[in-house]
Amino acid sequence: MRITDLLKESTIAMDLTATTKEGVIDELVDTLFNAGVLNDKQAYKEAIHAREAQSTTGVGEGVAIPHAKTDAVAKPAIGFGKSIAGVDYESLDGQPATLFFMIAAPAGGAQTHLDALAKLSGILMNEEVRAQLLHAKTAEEVIEIIEQNDEVETKEEVVLAPTGDASDDNLVLAVTACPTGIAHTYMAADALKNQAKKMGVPIKVETNGSGGVKNRLTDEEIKRAKGIIVAADVNVETNRFHGKNVIMVPVADGIKRPEELINMAQDTSRPLFEAKGGAVKSSGSKEKKGFYKHLMSGVSNMLPFVIAGGILIALSFFWGIKSADPKHETFNAFAALLKNDIGGNAFTLMIPILAGFIAMSIADRPGLAPGMVGGMMAASGGSGFLGALVAGFMAGYLMLLLKKSFEWLPQSLDGIKPTLIYPVFGVLFTGLLMNFVVNPPTKWLNEAMTNGLNGLSGTNIILLGLVLGGMMAIDMGGPFNKAAYTFGLAALGAGNNAPITAAMIGGMVPPLAIALSMIIFKNKFTTVQRGSIVSNIAMGLSFITEGAIPFAAADPARVIPSMIAGSATAGALAMAFGCRVPAPHGGIFVVGLDKGHWPMFLLALAIGVVVSAVIYGLLKKKPTEAELSEEAELA
């Protein structure tokens, strides 16, 4: 879509009479409304003012781009107005604004118009274009100027120095993002790229816009980068920048201070960024572009429902196992509310959420609806987690096929693809496949697995605990950990509490063991490392295995085998002692629900923690003089 598909003569006000910011907004809103762009003028104006309240859209250089993405917009459009005298628009550079582009984007608009708006932001960074627009005499001339500069969008890449290449040691990376993802995101990106060209610095900019992430930074680029600029007013992925020189500023700074930010990115004396939980790979890495990335997207979005729903259901048991049953003598109204309504609904949503976000990871937003419907059908059809996994991947790849199949439609119908064509056909085909192809065999397999688990006893159940407990400590939040946990959830949903008990106790061991090892073998750890004793105890008791990741990342050869030994021991002992915790999460806070066996659970946990702590403490070497010296310098 070209910019002039959105900018029409009817949306242009050549000579604004307003002398204030409020007046400019009123005139441009009236222009859009009179052109039939808005279905609710007042609601759109309120959305514009709400955006201005976040940060001014007077981006400097005489340009202001007020914008809003709202249901009050009937169709996407761009309004234009100019004021030769200039208006105080509270611009970032403190100078009057003379050129005004008001962007009206519908809440469910197509990606094509967002691409056009991104191009407009880039065009306005050109000083010559701004001068031409300011001196244009007619609406036709304005459109002609934009048309001449509205080049076909090219694939974003690293902007190279005049004589350099992408492998230069001074490579700078950047991420830009604003609340609406329409104007500031792309203007900051262009400002940084233009300035980097002037300075002869190679740069690559990732934009987190309304249409999603573009030009995503790769792990290899992050590894090579001298510095990374994060110019954003919303949350973006930053854990992938662990150990790098990172400059975090508002998106407006990317527009008004690009030279200063690029210089800071090349300053190797700055302190390095420390991500919460240690380094992680970006979701743009090759390793995570396939099955694992999509699975983890589903699991990570499902976990809040699992944890909240599971713990609230578990809390209802304090009034008795049957306290939520109105027919039972122990019935308690609050317990029923926790189990049947609040916790129960949260727990019910976890399967469709799992499937929906797997599909969304594969096919972006169009995959969410068919994925969630497929997940609901898996839950109601008896195929449970296994069915939800199949539903998520099936719906995601089905949506990719549908996108490809409807490419032949004319561009004028792009707006109805994400709102009508994709959801209708996606949900229909996913539902049919789930009902006739996926659910019958998956339900049978799910029941067979449940019957097999229920039949385990003696040595077999101890071996299961050994394997699940050990898996939780292999990568402490990675694929082995999540596979064991998901298996436990599936069994819990089918009424078997043994696997989730083994997984939970296995996941609690690593942080607790590391804390105990630091207490017992104090001289083998630095002061900074020992400072995490309390946090590791808290995370371990809460069943947050990831607390051990920084230690595992720093010394995997010693930490991982040590943790596996203790976690596997704890899992096996818990099964041997007959422990069965009827909750999917919560750690020490839900152990008491295992009536009659909770002391044995704590005993199994204590033994596993001691095993890991002692092995790790014996294997670990004392800190070197260099490490102690570095710590002293930091202190």
Image: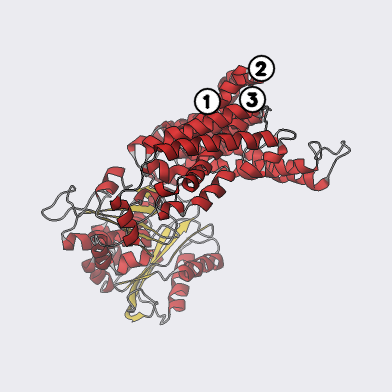
Q: Which residue is mark 2?
A: 455
Q: Which residue is mark 3?
A: 576
Q: Residue at x 40, y 80 (%)?
A: 17
Residue toward you, 420 or 578: 578
Q: Position of residue 35 (x, y in %)?
A: 45, 63
Task: Mark 1: give few (<14), some (14-19) or many (20+) Cα within 10 Å.
Answer: many
Callout 1: SS: helix
Q: Quadrant of residue 322?
A: top right
Callout 2: SS: loop
Q: Residue at x 80, y 43 (%)?
A: 319
Residue toward you, 108 or 444: 444
Mark 3–mark 1 distance (CA, rounded to whole Å): 13 Å
Mark 2–mark 1 distance (CA, rounded to whole Å): 17 Å
Q: Please, what is the three-letter code of the amino acid marked with disc 3?
A: Ala
Q: Please, what is the three-letter code of the amino acid marked with disc 1?
A: Val
Q: Residue at x 59, y 38 (%)?
A: 606
Q: Please, what is the three-letter code of the amino acid marked with disc 2?
A: Gly
Looking at marks 3 and 2 on the same chain, the residue that comes earlier in the sequence is marked by 2
Whether residue 609 appears in this view of the structure is: yes
- Quarter of the image that includes the C terminus: bottom left
Looking at marks 3 and 1 on the same chain, the residue that comes earlier in the sequence is marked by 1
| Of labels 3 and 2, the one closer to you | 3
Callout 3: SS: helix
Q: Position of residue 54 (x, y in %)?
A: 47, 68
| Of labels 2 and 1, the one closer to you | 1
The answer to whether residue 207 is above or below residue 44 is: above
Q: Are marks 2 and 1 in contact (CB under 8 Å)?
A: no
Mark 3–mark 2 distance (CA, rounded to whole Å): 15 Å
